[in-house]
Amino acid sequence: MRIWLVSLATVLMAGCGGGGSDAGGGSPAEAAAKVCEEHAVAQLDGKLHEMDVAALAASMRDAEEGTKFLTAPIVIEPGLASETKQVVECTVRFNDGQAAPEIIRFVFNW
């Protein structure tokens, strides 16, 4: 039940948060962080997690071939015996005519 509530809250918060420039003035870093967070949620398949999306956005820097690199810590299943701490590494590319950046590379770095 707890995981379901956290997943529901994450979906609702993502729907209310700022998006890319077409969604009311969000910065490119916020748009990239949102896409990376959504990808992390999909990879975690409903597992409880904690990640500072603002820190993920603040970490954005230029990478090779016009891409952007973002990284931030993530705690998977916080407070449980199976808790693990990892680092999300996400590379995105902004393309003209697309509302959101595309994920080029995404890993959980153990």
Image (cartoon, helix red, strand yellow):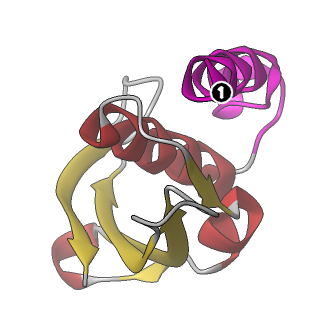
* Residue 95 visible in the shown view: no
Position of residue 86 relative to residue 36, above or below, is: below
For residue 105, side relative to residue 40 (left or right): left
**Are there few (<14), some (14-19), or many (20+) residues within 10 Å of tag 1?**
few
| Nearer the observer, 56 or 48 | 48
Please state the horizontal and vertical placement of residue 58, each as a whole percent of the image. Answer: 70, 75
Residue 88 is drawn in which quadrant?
bottom left
Task: Tell me the kind of residue under disc 1.
Answer: Arg
Which secondary structure lies at badge 1?
helix
Position of residue 78 relative to residue 3, above or below, is: below
* Residue 49 visible in the shown view: yes
Position of residue 78 relative to residue 62, above or below, is: above
Q: For the point 20% across and 83% down, which residue is it?
A: 64
Residue with the mark numbered 1: 2
9 in magenta: yes
| Nearer the observer, 39 or 86 | 86
Please state the horizontal and vertical placement of residue 77, each as a whole percent of the image. Answer: 50, 55
Q: Main secondary structure of the magenta part?
A: helix
Image quadrant where one finds the N terminus: top right
Q: For the point 57% across and 42% down, which residue is it?
A: 34
| Nearer the observer, 42 or 5 | 5
Residue span colored magenta: 1-26
